[in-house]
Amino acid sequence: MSQSKRWVLRAAMSLFVAGIFLISSPVSADVRLPHIIGSHMVLQQDKPLPIWGWADPGEKVTVKLGDREKSATTNEHGRWAVRFPAMKAGGPIEMTVSGKNTLKLTDILIGEVWVCSGQSNMEMGVGPAANGKEEIAAAKHPNIRLFQVPHRPSGLPESDIDVPWEHCTPESVARGDYGGFSAAGYYFGRALQKELNVPIGLIDTSWGGTRIEPWTPPEGFASVPALRGICETIAKANQDYFNAVPKAVEQIAAWVPVAKKDLEEGKRVSPPPGFPNHALNSHGQPTGLYNGMVQPIVPFAIRGAIWYQGESNRGEGMLYFEKMKALIDGWRKVWAEGDFPFYFVQLAPFRYQGDVLALPMIWEAQNASLAIPNTGMCVTVDIVANIADIHPINKQDVGKRLALWALAKTYGKEGLVYSGPLYKSMAVDGNKARITFDHVGGGFVSRDGKPLTHFQVAGEDKKFVDAKAEIDGATVVVSSDQVAKPVAVRFGWHQEAQPNLSNKEGLPASPFRTDRW
């Protein structure tokens, strides 16, 4: 890069940084907080609590949370931050933030905070989900608080988002772009609140029809070698934007005196020159939703996240596993809270157009994502009432199953069976294949009392045929008269498959294949 180009890039970046802080800092000298820190919020118990905001550069800001007090001085950009020691569940308490002015927050609870994110099956509200009218009327939970992030893409990281925390009421649960607050998130939080008996804070940041890439921060893509191309796309978009800013600023600066002169002379004032649009300022571009809908809540202390997404990435197969690694690692890096829990929903069966195996390949990638530390997967092959509806209305079981993972793995509740059977291994004995599973629970059952369905077996010719499957203790034995020597087994390997194998606790087995053909 030439010396002149380096100067332009540095100048553009300086202008960008200055602009960001002008936007995110108050026009007056008032102390200001991000909206994620507000009255009625839930603060995460048993974790250090970052509190931050803006004021005049060099201003001393004092924060009192309950009976604890911390002070900080703002930096040259007017940002300040303090960090309180961990607190136990309880409340309500108050917070005051004092500088040249004083802010007072009330009705603050200490409990468990979870982020709920993804595409339409996470965004789908309580209203259009099963028994929506009755569920909304019963949604009176003063110890559950809701924070619903509106749709907002951004090419660059945003610092705030203008929405309040609300009590969980029929009115707040019914409010939202897609029939109210996330049904999956609400039922997850309701189950936790009932079992843990502590306040629950739910942050719904979701948008229907979106891919995983817009939700992922740059740090996530950078951590996965297979996604280097996306890193290059982000870098180029940023550089193009930074390069375009100085020219736009010069054009606007040149326009101002001309516009003033025209105004003074009573002439028509021409419109100002346009400001460049960032190429990633879209709900379909990498980082576009992370920047606008996740970054504004970072680093608010959380326990973990639940995720329901993947329909828009169908057809990518195991590449989706790489993108899940990027998303999870990226969120964990920006929050800097270690490997916090990340529980996700395996997509439900649906009659897509095109390749009927494209959905099973996403199931496989989701299964593989369980290898990422501190993750869990809710299987949903049994909740579909209409195979032609991509949005199963039974979100109650989705929320309960996600909560089972959290109760068992995050909160240490003993004796819970929290997952359906997951494939472990296969052994061949003559003309039979014996399949072992993890998470058998109290034993296998056929959910409808009929012979087990959706098993297939193949020999060395790699041709799969329908197979007979029988429960034998903690294993399933698979065979077919057409295959003398089994080599591979598939289960539920079709986008419309709704197999009936479950454990006795009512949690369905996940589709799988033993081959990699």
Image: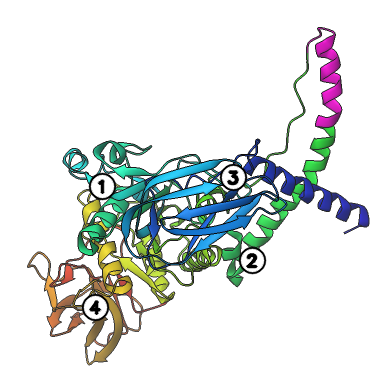
Quick check: 410 above or below 34? below
Q: Which residue is mark 1?
A: 142
Which of pointers 2 and 4 indicates the residue nearer the eye? 4
- Measured Cα–Cα span from mark 2 to mark 4: 36 Å
Residues packed near mark 2 inside 10 Å, few (<14), some (14 to 19) or many (20 plus): few
Tell me which numbered mark, 2 or 4, is placed earlier along the sequence. 2
Tell me the kind of residue under disc 1: Pro
Tell me which numbered mark, 3 or 2, is placed earlier along the sequence. 3
Tell me which numbered mark, 3 or 4, is placed earlier along the sequence. 3
The part of the chain drawn in magenta is: 252-268
Q: Which residue is mark 3?
A: 154
Which element carries disc 4, helix, strand or loop?
Answer: loop
Q: Which residue is mark 4?
A: 439
Q: Where in the figure is residue 484, as x and y percent of width and height?
A: 24, 86
Tell me the kind of residue under disc 3: Ser
Quick check: 163 above or below 17? above
Q: Which residue is the extreme one toward the right?
A: 3
**Visible residue check, residue 285:** no
Residue 510, label in figure: none
Tell me which numbered mark, 1 or 2, is placed earlier along the sequence. 1
Residues packed near mark 1 inside 10 Å, few (<14), some (14 to 19) or many (20 plus): few
Image quadrant occupied by the C terminus: bottom left
Image quadrant occupied by the N terminus: bottom right
The residue lying at 22 percent from left, 48 percent from top is: 386
Residue 228, label in figure: 2
The residue lying at 32 percent from left, 62 percent from top is: 89
Tell me which numbered mark, 3 or 1, is placed earlier along the sequence. 1
Name the residue nearer the viewer: 311 or 428: 311
